[in-house]
Amino acid sequence: MVRKLMYAAVLAVIAVLGIVVMGVSAQASDRQTPVDRDQYRALINQCRYADSARLRSECRAAVRNTYRVGEGDSALDCRTYSGVTVCGELTLSKREAACVQHSVKEGLTRRRSEVECYVFY
């Protein structure tokens, strides 16, 4: 009899934990910004240009935590230069930021400079 009560209690706890976990997952996806599949792919792909393995990993984790595939986000700033598409605000290193400043002084637009300096430096 005690064993049956223990099993019932364990099953009840498992059921409650399952409901709580599902609720937390649903809340997390509600906080993520929906973007279309191409935008999500561009966000993940642009992480490969971060300066180190750690930064690349952090970038991909940030994308997964911030965005989810759904309807496209027309407010997300996506642009393609030199065959590379990036979306959103780029986190530039000091070297990349200096490259942007130099390129803008030379006459390149800031948007293009950010993409090219992020990718090539």
Image: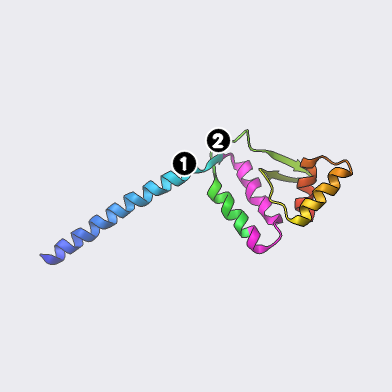
Residue type pointed to by label 2:
Glu
Label drawn at residue 12? none
**Label 2 CA crowd tier, 10 Å (few <14, some 14–19, many 20+):** few
Q: Residue at point 67% right, 38% down? A: 77
Q: Is label 1 in contact with label 2 (beta carbons under 8 Å)? A: no
Q: Is residue 29 left or right of residue 117?
A: left
Q: Is residue 49 left or right of residue 74?
A: right
Work out whether residue 100 or residue 32 is closer to the camera in this orientation and state it: 100
Residue furthest top in the image: 74
Q: What x and y, as percent, mark residue 98?
A: 80, 52
Q: Residue at point 82% right, 47% down? A: 101
Q: What x and y, as percent, mark residue 63?
A: 58, 49
- Say which element carries label 1: helix
- Name the residue that disc number 2 marks: 71
Say if the magenta span includes residue 55.
yes
Tell me, yes or no, if residue 43 can be seen here: yes
Q: Which residues are magenta?
A: 35-56
Q: Is residue 26 left or right of residue 83?
A: left
What colouring method underlies this structural image? rainbow
Q: Is residue 85 left or right of residue 26?
A: right
Residue type pointed to by label 1:
Asp
- Name the residue that disc number 1 marks: 30
Q: Is 28 above or below relative to 55?
A: above
How far apart marks 1 and 2 lie (CA) works out to 13 Å
Q: Is 48 above or below relative to 66?
A: below
- Say which element carries label 2: loop
Q: What x and y, as percent, mark residue 102?
A: 85, 48
Q: What x and y, as percent, mark residue 121?
A: 79, 56
Q: Nearer the viewer, mark 1 or mark 2?
A: 1
Q: Residue at point 63% right, 47% down? A: 41
Numbered-mark total: 2
State which quadrant residue 35 falls in: top right
